[in-house]
Image: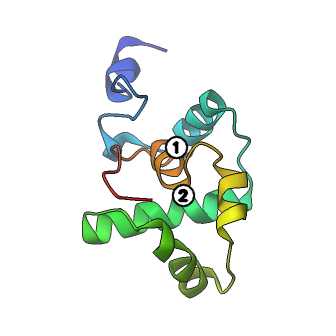
Amino acid sequence: MNELKKDLYKKDKEGFIKYPENWNQKVAFELAKLEGIELTMDHWKIINLIRKFYFKFGIFPKMRDLDEFLYKMYGNRLSSRKLYQLFPKNPIFQASKIAGLPKPTVCI
């Protein structure tokens, strides 16, 4: 990666990229790989929902609200168990990291 790209995708000490506006799907695939996650359609639903919510409201959805937002956006639900299967360390934190957003400060 050349120096310009390295600067565009600088990460903090916890692996969150510093400039969310530089995020794209290729970056998401690279970040997911570092997290040990192979992205599926269900992952993308969560990633896109969190990005949309964050850029609209400037905050992250809470875990308990995520299912409701998924239902409204996609017409289906994902249980907490399924969310943890998709993002085992923490659904909001890992999805936000892969989505190129800052580290969330929300409660689980």
Image location of residue 9, percent across then percent down = 39, 28
Instruction: Name which residue type carries label 1.
Output: Ile
Task: Say which quarter of the image contains residue 102.
Answer: top left
Residue at x 37%, y 47% (from the top left corner): 101
Instruction: Name which residue type carries label 2.
Output: Ile
Alpha carbons under labels 2 and 1: distance apart: 7 Å
Q: Quadrant of the C terminus?
A: bottom left
Residue at x 34%, y 63% (from the top left corner): 54
Q: Are marks 2 and 1 in contact (CB under 8 Å)?
A: yes
Label 1, on which residue?
98
Label 2, on which residue?
47
Q: What count of labels does the image hold?
A: 2
As helix, strand or loop, the secondary structure at mark 2 comes to: helix
As helix, strand or loop, the secondary structure at mark 1 comes to: helix
Image location of residue 70, percent across then percent down = 57, 77
Image location of residue 97, percent across then percent down = 46, 42
